[in-house]
């Protein structure tokens, strides 16, 4: 494997794990707002990001089986896309604006993990695509 491919994969791993690392780091940073408008806005943004993460999960894995289970036909099913990247970003921004909380951090990690439009899922999906890593796709 060429050194260029190895470097690109390392960058991919770092980019894919960045949201999780930032969510974990937010728990250990003490100098964040504890009350006031920042905390309220942070919780609203966090909730929006969690909602986007859940809707991405629904559109990726749950919608098709539910349509078929409820009597829909495979021929008439039309796939829809979620909202890429915004779920992860909103969860992280909301988390950093809120006061430190174990439950909020745990929720952030779960929301990042289930967000199929986020960076960790993107890296996982393109990991075996050699054209993405060797530069022929660009």
Image (spheres, grey):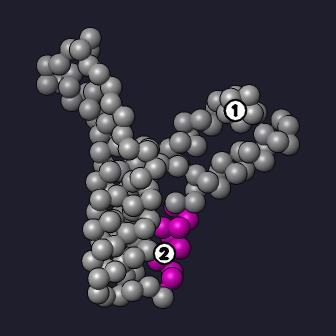
Pointer 2 with pointer 1, Cβ within 8 A: no
Residue 74, image x and y in percent? 26, 14
Which quarter of the picture shows residue 136?
top right
The answer to whether residue 101 shows anywhere in this view is no
Vertical side of 72 occupied by 28: above or below: below
Who's the residue at 52% across and 60% down the image?
19
SS category of the residue bearing label 1: loop
Locate the N terminus and report the quarter of the image it occupies: top right
Main SS category, magenta section: helix
Residue at image point 40% right, 71% down: 95
Q: In which quarter of the image is the C terminus?
A: top right
Q: Is residue 73 above or below residue 84?
A: above
Q: Is residue 133 visible?
A: yes
Q: Mark 1 points at which residue?
A: 138
> Mark 2 packing: few (<14 Cα in 10 Å), some, or many (20+)?
many
- Image location (x, y in percent) of residue 64: 28, 27
Q: Mark 2 points at which residue?
A: 26
Stretch in magenta: 20-30
**Does 107 lie within the magenta span?**
no
Question: What x and y, as percent, mark residue 42?
Answer: 34, 73
Tell me residue 134's x, y (percent).
76, 33
Q: How many labels does the image show?
A: 2
Report the disc number at residue 49: none
Circle 2 SS class: helix
Residue in the image at 64% along x and 30% along y: 129
Q: In the image, is 18 to the left or to the right of 84?
A: right
3D distance between C-alphas at marks 2 and 1: 35 Å
Crowding at label 1, few (<14), some or many (≥20) Cα neighbours within 10 Å? few
């Amino acid at each position: 494997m060429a050194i260029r491919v190895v470097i690109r994969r390392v960058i991919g791993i770092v980019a894919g794990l960045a949201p999780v690392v930032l969510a974990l780091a937010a728990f250990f940073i003490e100098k964040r707002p504890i009350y006031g408008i920042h905390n309220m806005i942070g919780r609203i943004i966090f909730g929006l990001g969690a909602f986007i993460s859940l809707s991405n999960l629904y559109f990726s894995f749950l919608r098709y089986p539910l349509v078929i289970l409820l009597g829909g036909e495979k021929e008439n099913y039309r796939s829809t896309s979620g909202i890429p990247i915004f779920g992860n970003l909103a969860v992280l921004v909301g988390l950093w604006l809120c006061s430190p909380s174990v439950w909020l951090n745990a929720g952030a990690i779960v929301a990042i993990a289930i967000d199929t439009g986020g960076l960790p899922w993107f890296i996982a999906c393109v990991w075996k695509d050699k054209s993405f890593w060797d530069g022929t796709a660009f």
